[in-house]
Image (cartoon, rainbow, N blue to C red):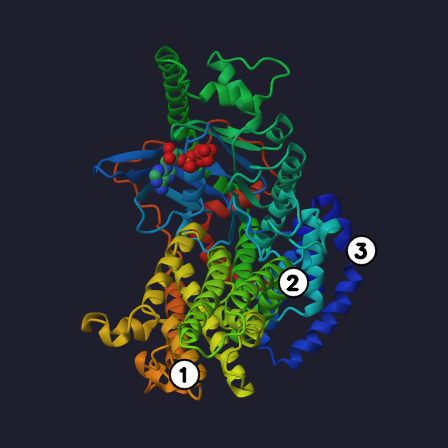
Amino acid sequence: MLGFLLGTAAICAPPQIGIPLGLGLAGVRAIAGRRRNARQSKLHTSDSEQKLEAKFEKVLANDVVEPVELLWTNLTCDLKVKDGSTKQILKGVSGVARPGRLVGLMGPSGSGKTSLLTALAGRVPAGSKLSLTGSLLVNGSPADEAGHRQAFVQQEDLFYSMLSVQETLKMAADLRLPQQMSAEAREAYVKQLVGVLGLAKAIETCVGDEKTRGLSGGEKKRLSIGCELVGSPSLIFCDEPTTGLDSFQAEKVMSTLKSLAASGHTVVASIHQPRSSIFAMFDDLVLLSEGQPVYSGPADQALAHFEALGHHCPEHYNPAEFLADLISLDFASPEAEADSRARLNKLVAAWRAKEATAAATAATAKKAAGSSSSSKDMARAASTDLVMRRAAELPRAGPLRQLRLLLVRSWRQVVRDRATNFSRAMSNLSSAIVFGAIFFRMRTGQSSIQDRMGLLQVASINTAMASLVKTLNIFPRERTIVARERARGAYGILPYLSAKLAAELPVGALFPLLFGAIVYPVCGLHPSLPRFAKFLGILTLESFTSQALGLAVGAVAPSTEAAMAIGPAVMLVWIVFGGYYVNADNVPTLFKWLPRASLIKQAFEALCVNEFPGLTFEADANGGGMRTGEQVLSWLSFDKSTIPARAASQARILLFYYWATFCILRASAPRYQTVRPDASPATSVPTPAAEPAKSAIAPAATAAMAMPAAAKEAAPAAVKSAAA
Ligand SMILES: Nc1ncnc2c1ncn2[C@@H]1O[C@H](COP(=O)(O)OP(=O)(O)OP(=O)(O)O)[C@@H](O)[C@H]1O
């Protein structure tokens, strides 16, 4: 199985590293292969899967990435605005991304880079106000039918902050690689990936967050790329990978992308205004302004193109800056705007004319490329293609394995997050000290009845709020990570939620216990050990229910800020109907369900039922007042209540929130729209006007592009011969 690693390593590593590495470790691969076979026979893996896996290894070991060519023609993105009109964000953009080449998407802010990248990656949400038309082809087939593997590295780097680089990559590998891979092979695969990403020095460093120091911005970005690389995608999209990084880190990130392109991947990265050393890394360049194409072709021919149009880039000038200035609109004054707009219109018109001229040539070239490919090339590409696709379908981690892996991850996150745990402990401790000081050693006078009720109410509110706020702070962010991982098909919602709860509940229970253990004796609540234990149990269950409410709100809210606004507002309703401010008997029929659904009410009522029975109070100055705890319960309308009944109600509310969270998360699985064919007749052929320099694997790419129909016929024969 180490062969798998070596193959992938050879693909991911720059050629000068990959080839010696492959040769040097060939012996180790043989040993690992024998171990794998033994393990597999133990697992009763089916023969066909073993054969497929062997072929998969062979394909990877031969340093072959399935070549993928992405071709977009006349791509238009319309945005419906409020008044019913339409704003064009992309206005008929065409271009190509070839295997083995790094394509830079450049343009001024708001020019449509992110929109184009998102459209190319097929990540425009379905049902949004955006609609896409045009043509998007992968190796000649519509992108949504091509079945290729691709990765989308988003601008924001999100991770479980307490996991190290190695653990993060290993988790991605464990969840997403075929489960037949041995543990050693996975480990070696991760090690190799770390090398490719240049993260060897940071391998044990935890990712970190605002509270805990960890990876630098550049290292986080490379880790994001690494997580997306698991599964060896042919096509890699990267949205503004250098944003927020210093020039050194930005260059390292771009070098990683460049070496991935050099090993056969097709890489497309949007970038705002790179320094000249980064600009020099681009093989191809797509320039956009105001959603219109200004240039699309080899990066080293861009300046010549604009030179021919009368715009000369001064010597020793950063070409990226020159191009950015050239295609930007100047809003300094109406005259400057009119001038820059006129210049831009000319540049766009010149490019459109060049595209139109290239159309006929490209059609002929495409035909020639198809016929010049040897049948051997075609069979090889078809074989590779089929094996890679089928290998990607090998079973990954099943639900139980997912549960185990996710449990380990959540547990590490919860236990290692000392900063959060410390602040939670301090918050509960300080609340306990404040309440302890206010309600210190309550006596048995009439006024102590109110004090006891007040303490029980604030104890239930404090416990609920502490748990809610902590969950709202963390969960919306975690939900985004989960959504990304689910988009890669890493795991299901049920294993995720089960693992999260199993890991978090034991740690989460410590904080209400700490609070209750101080408040109960200090305030002089009913002096009985069983009642003390029940007091702690009621608070802990309430804390879990409040966490579940936080999960449901966090699942539905679009951001942490929104969740922090919605959660306390919902909690306020439960506090009002918490049994202290409004007597349940006086609630209008329409709202009768509210006290029943209030987690505060269930906790407060249970705490009262635990506290008051058996207590006696001194009479007031007139000899009146409530003399027994039972009278107090009756006054509160809690006289028929029992602790098991309240606990059962609380458990029902808890389960309802879990169920709601599950349903919301499942329903919110991202759905993306496909590109609708353009109704108008095709106006251009999507080939850069200038012929790009041929990459090492360009012939394979051309063959793959030209032969989807032929591939279908050639594939079975090719695979048969490979199996033989
Ligand atoms: N979902 C959307 N709703 C409203 N406007 C949008 C949406 N998506 C894009 N736009 C608009 O389309 C234009 C292009 O946006 P886009 O984010 O693609 O530009 P960009 O070149 O990536 O900008 P930047 O470099 O600043 O990130 C902008 O004017 C933007 O406001």
Badge 1 density bin: few <14, some 14–19, many ≥20, Cα 10 Å: many
Residue appearing at x 35%, y 61% in the figure: 572
- How many numbered marks, from 0 up? 3
Which tag is nearer the camera, tag 1 or tag 3?
Answer: 1
Name the quadrant of the N terminus: bottom right
- Regarding residue 492, the answer to whether it shows in the image is no
**Left or right for 365, reference 556:** right
Residue 183, placed above or below residue 237: below
The one of 158 and 516 positioned closer to us in this rendering = 516
Identify residue for label 3. 24
Name the quadrant of the C terminus: bottom right
Residue 531, placed above or below residue 142: below
Residue extending furthest front?
622
Q: Of callouts 2 and 1, which one flags the residue occurring earlier in the amino acid sequence?
A: 2
- Regarding residue 282, the answer to whether it shows in the image is yes
Q: Residue 416 — which label?
A: 2
Badge 2 density bin: few <14, some 14–19, many ≥20, Cα 10 Å: some
Identify residue for label 1. 609
Name the element at disc 1.
helix
**Residue 387: image location, x then y, percent:** 55, 61
Q: Of callouts 1 and 3, which one flags the residue occurring earlier in the amino acid sequence?
A: 3
Mark 1–mark 3 distance (CA, rounded to whole Å): 74 Å
Inspect the image, locate mark 2, and give the three-letter code of the amino acid beneath it: Arg
**Left or right for 584, reference 463:** left
The one of 438 and 676 positioned closer to us in this rendering = 438
Inspect the image, locate mark 1, and give the three-letter code of the amino acid beneath it: Val
Residue 555, placed above or below residue 617: above
Residue appearing at x 76%, y 66% in the figure: 30
**Residue 386: image location, x then y, percent:** 52, 59
Mark 2–mark 1 distance (CA, rounded to whole Å): 38 Å
**Left or right for 316, reference 331:** right
Inspect the image, locate mark 3, and give the three-letter code of the amino acid beneath it: Gly
